[in-house]
Amino acid sequence: MPDRYVREQVIPQARRIVVKVGTNSLTDEHGRLDHAIIARLADQIARLMARGLSLTLVASGAIGAGMAELDLPGRPKTMPLLQATAAVGQGQLMRVFHDAFARHGVKVAQVLVTRDDFEDRTRYLNIRNTLQALEEVGALPILNENDAVAVDEIRFGDNDMISAHVTNLLAANLLVLLTNVDGVLKDGKLMDVIEQVDESALALATAQRSKLGSGGMGSKISAAALVVRAGEVAVIAKAREHDVLIRLLDGQRLGTVFVPAHRKMSSRRRWIGQASRPAGKVMVDEGAAKAIAQGGKSLLPSGVVAIHGSFPKGATVSILNLAGRQIARGLTNYSSQQLDRIKGLRTSQIAKVLGDKPYDEVVHRNNMTLV
């Protein structure tokens, strides 16, 4: 899928768009919220909404806003102080967004999330229902990680991954990651397009992070990878570029475009493969690995060689080949204890060992996502 086709045909046809803007793009050199850039962002989003497009905004900046409000000399080092600063700053951030969008007659809604909310299937669907209801009433959802309550175990760590999960949750056509650089650079030059997110693409990212932000180019490329593997388009572009969103949707050449996979994943497969957290691991033999990876087959007990971890029936598990590389994720029909008893057996032997045979498959192909 050529870069020009994606830019001039696919992106302008996007009807549902997720925009992520980071702390460094929303604040000035002193770490305070930049009202001018927020006003320009609000103007662009309002103009796109006036076209009939559905927009969702993922915005960092709560900690930066809290630092300014509390006159802190630098970013706090401890989790309690970070959470307290975020609690102070979140209200300030939403107040600024409210006022900026009110000038265009756009209502805004605050949605705070943690990683747990995406890993739990019920809460995942509840987020989607809420965002769709906000679209119906014409309000702009503004999402942020709930830093005030999240601890390391339930944190994403940056809003880049949240924006990717929201894009997949909504089956949005386009994710735009706005940052403080023009896009992905290679040897100091802007890359117009990345056709496949592999090790060489990830190597382009620097490990450096901004003074206030929590992410970097690596997290943005990883977020883009989740989106394009699901069959949607992602773009990394400069937030302060004049009318960057409008010009992107008009097909102009800005930023770095990530080309989507040819086949779109279903919503269920996106959750299984990208949002849910595996509760355990199932190692399979060479034949089963080939049948899954190349033939899209279900996993049968005969192909299972080892089970790692303790998990119930219905849990998400990682499926590994003999080299220990994850080849798929799926929902298991059997608990870890049951699997340990039937691994390596033919399906006709399951009932004899367990007393009954509720399923032929350990993981059915309809509940599996290749990774």
Image (cartoon, helix red, strand yellow):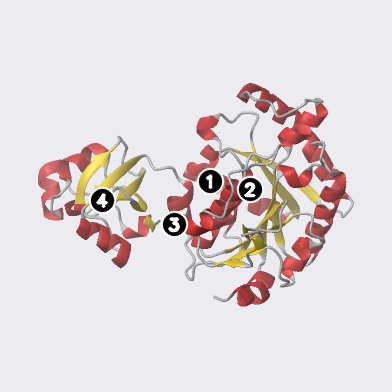
* Residue labelled with disc 1: 124
Q: Mark 2 falls on what kind of element?
A: helix
Comes first in the chain, label 2 or label 3 = 2
x 64%, y 42%: residue:
209
Q: Horizontal and vertical percent for residue 313? A: 31, 42
Q: Quadrant of the C terminus?
A: bottom left
| Residue furthest front in the image | 187
Mark 2, mark 3: which one is toward the viewer? 3
* Residue labelled with disc 3: 269
Q: Mark 4 falls on what kind of element?
A: loop
* Residue situated in front as seen by the camera: 15 or 157: 157
Q: Are marks 2 and 3 in contact (CB under 8 Å)?
A: no
Mark 4, mark 2: which one is toward the viewer? 4
Left or right of 100: which side holds 302? left
Query: Is residue 180 visible to the viewer in this orientation of the structure?
Result: yes
Measured along the vertical axis of the image, is residue 100 above or below residue 76?
A: below
Q: Mark 1 falls on what kind of element?
A: helix
Q: Mark 3 falls on what kind of element?
A: helix
x 15%, y 54%: residue:
347
Amino acid marked by disc 4: Val
Q: Are marks 4 and 2 in contact (CB under 8 Å)?
A: no
Give how far apart the Cα atoms at labels 3 and 4 are. Answer: 17 Å
Give how far apart the Cα atoms at labels 2 and 1 are. Answer: 10 Å
Q: Horizontal and vertical percent for residue 38? A: 82, 48
Comes first in the chain, label 2 or label 1 = 1
Specify the quadrant of the image occupied by residue 95. top right
* Residue labelled with disc 4: 362
Left or right of 21: which side holds 206? left
Amino acid marked by disc 3: Arg
Comes first in the chain, label 4 or label 2 = 2
